[in-house]
Amino acid sequence: MSTVIVLAFTGLGLGALYFLIASGLSLIFGLMHVLNFAHGAILGVGAYVGWWAASHVGGGPGLRLLLAVLVGMATSTVLAALLELVLVRRLYDREIAQVLVTVGVGLALVALLQGIWGTDPRSYPVPGWMRETIHVGGAAIPQGRIVVIVVGALVLAAFVLFLRHTRYGLIVRAGVENRAMVTALGIDVRRAFTLVFALGGAAAGLAGALAGAYFGTVTPQLGSSLLIYAFIVVVIGGLGSVTGSAIAAVLVGLLQQFTNYYAASGLGDLSVVLLLAVVLLLRPQGLLGRPV
């Protein structure tokens, strides 16, 4: 029984990481219809800049991790906003160009990270208390897993509250349905869309910092490897549904962990792809997506 509990918490922790990345992707695509392939690289930049900042200050690992999170989120937020303002804003009606530009930016950012800090993994500041364990049902669970799960739940609640109960959330949703009408009312929809991109970047920066603490290291390919699963989560959950992404992230994380343990190591990835295929066959719009 303790093995099942450990696998469950590990899967939930991994699912929370997937959700943090997928939430930004889902928000940007669902509201603005932009597939941002640079999202993973933005996560990587946030993780590396946070790591660099934490490596150049004193204090304990806890303070350094907090600094890494704040600096990483700030960097990713600014980077995502600049991407929308400088490049994507001019391409809202040209979907192929959006894909090419964001893929190019993603590749350039990864190359930039490799050029500055090399390709070797870098150790991330992880407080000792995150490595300590608590006992749940007789199983020893690392507290770091609990932190990631709690942060994922808080981000989900924050996004839902923003979209449903704030003025900007209302403007964004109305702008997606009918941008011309909202603009005619004197509301600057472009500013709201830039805000959505910035929020997605902030979530990516947070995911990068927590992924560094979760795995203990960061590499230039960290964002790219996680982005693949984030896209799968977004498709399974339903394009544009943040809540659907949360449900899908939990399913993917748990399925991956249990399959790797009870079947064979490595089959977890295959099981995720099979889950994606089954969902697309039975419900093409995803779990909580709108019918096309």
Image (tube, helix red, strand yellow):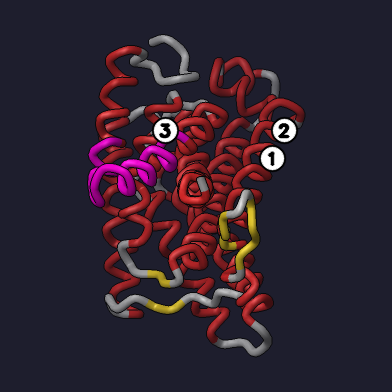
The stretch drawn in magenta includes residue 260: yes
- What is the C-alpha distance between the residues marked 2 and 1? 5 Å
| Residue at 34% in and 76% down | 121
Q: Is residue 115 above or below residue 73?
A: below
Q: Is residue 58 left or right of residue 76?
A: right
| Residue at 62% in and 54% down | 146
Report helix, strand or loop for mark 3. helix
Prevalent SS, magenta region: helix
Name the one closer to the observer, 198 or 266: 266
Which label number is shown at residue 234? Answer: 3
The stretch drawn in magenta includes residue 79: no
Q: Which residue is mark 1?
A: 158
Regarding residue 239, the answer to whether it shows in the image is yes
When asked about the image quadrant of residue 223, the answer is: bottom left
Q: Which residue is mark 2?
A: 161
Q: Is residue 120 left or right of residue 71?
A: left
Mark toward the start of the polypeptide (2 vs 3): 2
Mark toward the start of the polypeptide (3 vs 1): 1
Name the spot of residue 276 as percent of width and height, x first. 31, 28
Q: What's under tag 2, amino acid-wise?
A: Leu
Q: Is residue 285 above or below residue 111?
A: above
Name the spot of residue 228 as percent of width and height, x first. 31, 45
The answer to whether the residue labelled 3 contacts the one labelled 1, judged by CB atoms less than 8 Å apart, is no
Q: What's under tag 1, amino acid-wise?
A: Ala
The answer to whether the residue labelled 2 contacts the one labelled 1, judged by CB atoms less than 8 Å apart, is yes
Crowding at dot 1, Cα within 10 Å, few <14 / some 14-19 / many 20+, comes out as few
Region rendered in magenta: 251-271
Name the spot of residue 20 as percent of width and height, x first. 52, 46
| Residue at 41% in and 20% down | 286
Report helix, strand or loop for mark 1. helix
